[in-house]
């Protein structure tokens, strides 16, 4: 069932208070710097908390954020609610098998990923600030961000989407809802 805007305006939720910003990351324009700082603070908080909670023995480097092409970030007032990061790689142009994102992928995994084409839309670091998880029964920001991911994918020339999903937050289930197929399960992606 499709909801219209009047269905979403409840006493606890006003859709109009949220704003989507598409932030270029490697060379942001000067006017995007305030949003980029807020988005970076949100990203660092969520992922550093995860690293601490799961005792991941590697640092969180800022280039994991800034090497992406774009962040789709949702804001309310001066707070970043959440974001998802995107970049497009083309295995026909370069051997992205040597990219750190694909470090745990076997040749068979890459072959399965690129079966429908070599241009891969890489979605990563889906992030929702803890204050906005469970914010509303009508609006789940992880679902909104994944829907934005699909829309951004259709705006590119990429052939497929790649995403490494967190099972502890149910991102894999949301991805299946959108048509994702498993390449490989149970990979300790951040533990290496």
Image (cartoon, rainbow, N blue to C red):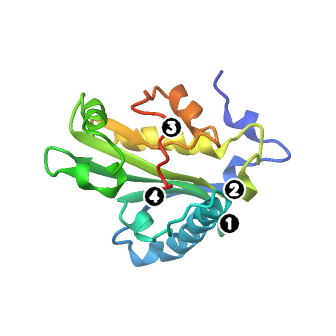
- Sequence order check: which comes first, mark 2 or mark 1? 2
Q: Which residue is mark 4?
A: 71
- Sequence order check: which comes first, mark 4 or mark 2? 2
Q: Nearer the viewer, mark 4 or mark 1?
A: 4
Taking the image as shown, residue 134 lies to the left or right of residue 80, namely: right
Are circles 4 and 1 on residues that touch, CB within 8 Å? Answer: no
Taking the image as shown, residue 29 lies to the left or right of residue 72, namely: left
Q: Which residue is mark 3?
A: 186
Q: Which residue is mark 1?
A: 77
Q: Quadrant of the C terminus?
A: bottom left
Residue visible at 69% across and 56% down in the picture: 17
Secondary structure, mark 3, is loop
**CA separation in Å, label 3 and label 4:** 26 Å
Q: Nearer the viewer, mark 3 or mark 2?
A: 3
Are circles 4 and 2 on residues that touch, CB within 8 Å? Answer: no
Q: Which mark is residue 17?
A: 2
């Amino acid at each position: 069932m499709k909801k219209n805007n009047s269905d979403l305006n409840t006493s606890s939720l006003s859709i109009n208070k949220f704003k989507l910003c598409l932030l270029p990351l490697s060379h942001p324009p000067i006017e995007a710097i305030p949003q980029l700082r807020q988005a970076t603070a949100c990203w660092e908080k969520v992922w550093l908390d995860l690293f601490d909670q799961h005792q991941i023995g590697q640092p969180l480097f800022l280039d994991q954020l800034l090497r992406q092409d774009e962040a789709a970030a949702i804001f309310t007032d001066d707070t970043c609610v959440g974001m998802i990061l995107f970049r497009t790689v083309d295995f026909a142009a370069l051997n992205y098998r040597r990219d750190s994102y694909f470090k745990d992928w076997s040749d068979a995994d890459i072959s399965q990923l690129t079966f429908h084409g070599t241009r891969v839309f890489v979605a990563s670091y889906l992030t929702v600030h803890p204050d906005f998880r469970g914010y509303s029964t009508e609006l789940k920001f992880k679902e909104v961000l994944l829907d934005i991911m699909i829309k951004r994918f259709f705006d590119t020339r990429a052939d497929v989407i790649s995403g490494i999903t967190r099972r502890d937050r149910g991102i894999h289930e949301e991805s299946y809802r959108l048509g994702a197929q498993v390449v490989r399960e149970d990979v300790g992606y951040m533990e290496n």
